[in-house]
Image: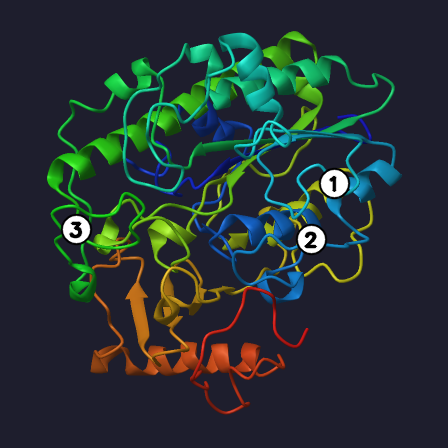
Amino acid sequence: MPEKPNILLFTTDQQRGDHLSIAGHPFVLTPNVDSFVNNGAYFPNAYTEVPSTTAVHRIMNCGKGNYDCGLVGYSHADWDEDTFLAGVLADNGYHCMSIATRNFGVRRKLFGYHSVITSAGFDLDTSDYLQWLVREMGPHAHHHAHGCDANGWLARPWHLPERCHPTNWTVDTTIEQIQKRDPTRPFFVWCGLRAPHSPYDPPQHFWDMYVNKELPEPPVGDWAAKHDIPVQFPDRCTWHGRLQPEHSHRARAGYMGLCTHIDFQFGYLLERLQGMGLLNDTLVIFTSDHGDMMGDHHLHRKTYAYEGSARVPFLIKYPEGFYPATGVFDYVVGQQDIMPTILDAAAIEIPDGCTGRSVFDAICGKPWREFIHGEHSPGNTAEESMQYLTDGKQKYIWFPLTGQEQLFDLVNDRQELHDLSGDPAWAERLKLWRARLVEILSKRPDGLADGEKLLMQSESWGPVARGL
């Protein structure tokens, strides 16, 4: 392996951790990313610290967890961070490129990258993808001309040639930028896709793979009755409620189609890197910012602590000559670990203030965290703001505006069908998890704990970390 490997950070948006073949999904095909387990690592217990995009993109790029990164919810706030990942890599000789759907306050701000190309947004001024699409398909071309909303459950096949899909464009543009890189430097590329975030609009081939299959019904917990709201004509961007069976089926089929389409385009990118003689010298990380509830427990979209929203894919392919252990690792990891992992592989000192750690420590058997902490400020509905802890075996959730607690046994109930918080047999575990959260929150000045107990909140609060 060269002293400093090339680095490809490949991120998706809103991809559930269970929507991979290697995760045991009964239908979704992801052969390219699954193969990483043979010469890399798969972490089935990867969780997002803040299950919505903006905060996670900050966490990924600064190596700091939820509260420490300064954002605990969804906000288009600008950031002034001296030690962003790309800046640190650039200072150490890397050519840094961002071809991504990036939810930063100013989409074209460099944040240490040498170049920024973005597919985000609906405005020609801010979306390089839209500018390209109009040049290719005419002045009225639009990626949402199929009528499906960017945050809704509507689904249908992609309406333009497959090569015009944002996923294809992002991968093609990434290949083009790598070809135009400074060949005297190692490269760092963040290739960030919008999919499988809604709209659920895979190209026809990938739609056809799933739409006529008999898909399992979404899991519904014995605690989820309050979300079971049958609405004949629900808002297409609804956060909760029971969809009509046809709508639910099409949404899930479209989402699965997007996951497989991503995997095939990811495989194409790896093939092109191989053809350029670069793949063997490249560290590749595949992950997502958060998941998608997809109707689980009659919930939709994200911001929840439940598995559909909070658990994400996390896989690494090693460069040739890099010799840590390979396979499946059950350690609980988060998005704050991305920056330290990349810097560790590049033999670059990790900046002070990073709360994440290099996952190579876990892979090599060094002491690792026992659990991870996540949260989200009031968003879709204020009462659903939450704090959660998980070690991948159990999960504890606390809702600051209602005082409600939930406890799940993920070993025997990964779909979170049974809330054990009221079960006397689990009372000691509930007490232990609550004490752990009290210890964490008592170190913060935002009034969520006082050293002895959790403190309910009487009013909502914003996404920017309070008191930091």
| Label 3–label 1 contact, CB within 8 A | no
At mark 1, the secondary structure is: loop
Determine if residue 212 is in view: yes
Find residue 242 and name its label. 3
Q: Which residue is mark 2?
A: 78
> In the rendered structure, are the residues bearing label 2 and label 1 in contact, judged by CB atoms less than 8 Å apart?
yes
Pair 2/3: label in front: 2
Colour mapping: rainbow
Question: Distance of mark 2 from mark 3, alpha carbons?
Answer: 37 Å
> 408 or 198, which is in the foreground?
198
Residue 24 image point, x, y percent = 31, 37
Q: Are marks 2 and 3 in contact (CB under 8 Å)?
A: no
Residue 365 visible somewhere in the drawing: no
Left or right placement of residue 422 versus residue 441 in this view: left
Q: Position of residue 150 (x, y in %)?
A: 40, 37
Residue at 24% in and 72% down: 420
Q: Which mark is residue 410?
A: none
Q: Residues within 10 Å of mark 3 (few under 14, many from 20)?
A: many
Looking at the image, residue 386 sits to the left or right of residue 184; the answer is: left
User: 323 or 174, which is in the foreground?
Assistant: 174
Amino acid on which disc 3 is placed: Arg
